[in-house]
Amino acid sequence: MSDQKVNHRQVNENQCQACMPLGSVIALKGIEGSMAVVHGSQGCSTYMRLSMVEHFNEPVDIASSSLNEKQAVYGGEQNLRKALDNVTRVYHPRIIGVMTTCLTETMGEDIDQMIQVYRKERKDTGIDIIPISTPSYSGSVTEGYWTATREIIRYYAKDALPHDGINVILPLVSPADIREIKRILDLMKISYTLIPDISSTLDRPYGISYEKIPPGGTKPEDIQKMSGARATIQFGTQCPDSISPGLFLKEKFGVPLYNLPLPVSLHHMDQFIDTLYTLSGNPVPSSIMLERGWLCDAMADAHKYMAEVRPVLYGEPELISAIYTLCLEIGSEPRVIATGSPHYSLMDDDVTNTDGGVDRIVLKDADFASIEYESVQRGVNLAIGHSGGKILTERHGIPLVRVGYPVHDRLGGQRIVSVGYTGTLTLLERIANAYIEEKYRTYRQSRKAEYYDTGEMMHAES
Amino acid sequence: MQTIPSVTDGASPLCLKEREQSIITTGKSNPRINCVDDSLAGAVSQRACVYCGARVVLNPITDAVHLVHGPIGCASYTWDIRGSLSSGSEMYRNSFSTDLKERDVIFGGEKKLALCIDEIVEKYHPPAIFVYATCVVGIIGDDIIAVCKSASSRHGIDVIPVESSGFISGNKIIGYRVAGNALMKLLTPKEGEVIEKTKKVNFLGEYNLGGEKWLIERYLRELGIEINVACTGDSTVASIKQILGGFLNLVQCTGSMHFIARMLEENYHTPYIHVNFFGAYNTSDSLRRIARFYNEPRMIERAEKLIYRENERIKPVIQHYRQKLTGKRAAIYVGGAYKALAIIRQLRELGMEIVFCGTQTGRPDDYEQIHGMLQPGSVIADDANPAEIERFLIEKKVDLMAGGIKERVLAYKLGIGFVDHNHDRKDCLAGFDGAVNFAHEVFVTACSPVWKSIRNQPAWEVAHV
């Protein structure tokens, strides 16, 4: 049904992904009292800061061990130690995550060992220092994000007494998405540990006193207890097993894992609520049923427009999988599904309502040159994804609905909601309205071009 | 606000001890500032790397391909980030990467680089490809010079290596130098090739971020002078190759282009003068000096006419904003010193007081100039970090910050106005039009009602606290 295609060209033209350490830093920012030290050259941390600042519209501080050629040859341990010292002095963090880069990985820096020695010498700091290996030639933001989340859990999770709470492990979604997921969990009266929680650390309200490390994030003491949880819900159907945080908790501590798709779309959200209902035995409150009803109502209202939408979806694997489901359940046929991550598999079985005849392609490890080519070939008329897709609009007039990471050319990347019944409704109407806007802008001219007879033909014949 | 503990005692000193020599207060003690040094590990420098410096200088060459040899990140972070405008090709707005994977890092990336170049040539036939070395390439020792040389002769186009491994000491400044070397390679005539001298000028260190090159071109035409080529805003490979035809080099961004100007003077005897088109005063002064260089009375006359006309035109507008802005306090943190100097002058023209000024890449003589322009008690910092900037924004009761994106979000969080003077701006800030645009932008943010609106707390919120 769908072609699966890996990019066979050598050159990557216009990137649909960024590097592993960036994903790792984003995940770390969801842990309370944390600060990141990127072990590499100065530029890496600055680029990551820029990327995050543009998306989240928040100050984001990331330290660097600022290696030069001398350290590149003789090793960067002294610089890393200095960086840890200085970050401790200025930021008073509770946790420091140390991410490697392609430079330090290629140099063969053993950061585990360096950190061990450092900790032994600086006994009294009380700071947890977590090494996270993220060579950017081995993956993308997605893999960096999962790796960091897994390493943080691995660092803290110890055998804990069994308790009633559940673990909720999130892929890279917006702070607003996380707030929505928490609201749903609260409505279902479930106690939970959610990780990584960037809902307030990367989206702080104005008016609270400014702190260098923003308040919020998952508490280390809660992470410690994740091993005793009743179950783990992980929105990570696309997450490779080797870096799956939920799988780690299952294998090491026997915590049952519900690896669910991201709750965008009616079907996925139903699965989420269903799981919460089963796990807790608590009734689903009427407010959630109302929200579901509103989403269904909106889907009915939008279905005919959506049937005309032939979208390209690209970005984070979990997000595009979920939006793919949303499209299919309302009767829109995605033509191109693409991710810059090397890991992706489309799960058609999730949805029964597919039209087998549609010409569809799945691209992983994709760049925008291939996304652009396939989109034009396959008559795509709407793009859904991050800001990289702006070239589809600029070059081909394809409207873009911005969602995912990064959204750097519009305000409010940190506050785009697409999860939950309500978030799905919002996203659905943004998509439908983008299509309607384009249609209403062009239909007069289109119809005229198609049908209006100037009489010239007749004139010519006579 | 948190206090920043020192390395030594944790009491309440200014900053990290190693940073103390990089921060000075005017009118106090030692005016020497420690700069042009490598960033301190863990200090959260706002600086970028050698690759970044090289890429921002070369990227505006509109019809060239920019191929980043390394893992994906470096290309991804620099895709279409610089807002330089083009009157023709849009090729430069693409970002190409050899996307090195683990295999390539182990076995070497030269083969893949050669294949990537072949693919690009086949698809786009660009007149030139710049190949940037990144950190990994510097470590695994790919011989990009050899690969470029062979690709160059294979395809009959310029394939120019840019040796910009990010970890090279000196970061962005060295990146400028590396870009300069690449430009010199491009513009050096092939054997037997002769480039005719003209009466035109080259405009070095102008990147056409908001159409500045085009506006200045209009002014110069009015004087009777044509621009041969701007380096590198809205330039093409072919036009860069004509640079030796220039009669005079105008150098604006000294950080990035002083090297090229010097090389052109030493090797090809093209003289250069410094210009600066940010602000009405600087624009007038630059036009006068250019006209004087040509030493043609008619040209000087035309320059004076233009300067008078434009100054008269904008005076009432500037005066209007000056009334609103007089007495407001400003902070500046930008990449290059020439920009800092221009902004200081412009904000002063608007009646504002500069209480903090820092740069990422300033040199000792730049800081001497900055020092000379500020009132006693102002703070000057080299390679400042967010903790320091935050501290001085609050301590100095700043109303307006001028800087880049990273400074913007910090300023807004602290309830301070912000004016963008960086690569992602969309508006023209040069010349007389630019002076008005700048004043307007400063006014709408420094005097915005929003600060009062969001600072006001409702009674119930106050009660709650």
Image (cartoon, rainbow, N blue to C red):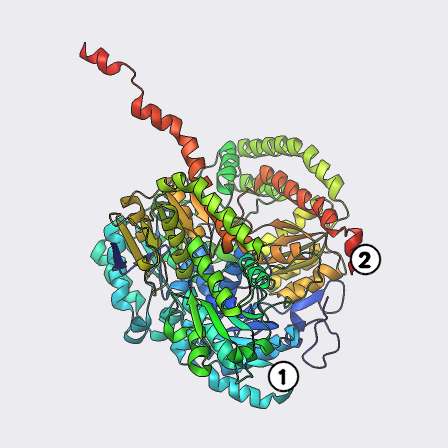
Q: Is residue B375 visible?
A: yes
As drawn, which residue projects farthest toward the top? A462
Residue situated in front as seen by the camera: B256 or B49: B49
Label 2, label 1: how far apart the Cα atoms are: 37 Å
The residue shown at (40%, 69%) is A136
Q: Is residue B142 left or right of residue B216?
A: left
Residue situated in front as seen by the camera: B263 or B91: B91
Q: Is residue A40 visible?
A: no
| Amino acid residing under circle 2 | Ala
Q: Are marks 2 and 1 on the same chain?
A: no
**What element does badge 1 sit on?**
loop
Q: Which mark, residue B261?
A: none
Identify the image quadrant of residue B12. bottom right
Position in image of residue A373 (x %, y %): 29, 48
Position in image of residue B83 (x %, y %): 48, 48
| Amino acid residing under circle 1 | Gly
Q: Is residue A163 left or right of residue B329?
A: left
Residue situated in front as seen by the camera: B286 or A129: A129
Closer to viewer: mark 2 or mark 1? 2
The residue shown at (27%, 14%) is A455
Position in image of residue A12 (x %, y %): 32, 58
Residue situated in front as seen by the camera: A264 or B174: A264
Residue holding disc 1: A126
Q: Which mark, residue B463?
A: 2
Q: Is residue A141 left or right of residue B159?
A: right
Identify the image quadrant of residue B100. bottom left
**What element does badge 2 sit on?**
helix
User: Which chain is mark 1 on?
Assistant: A
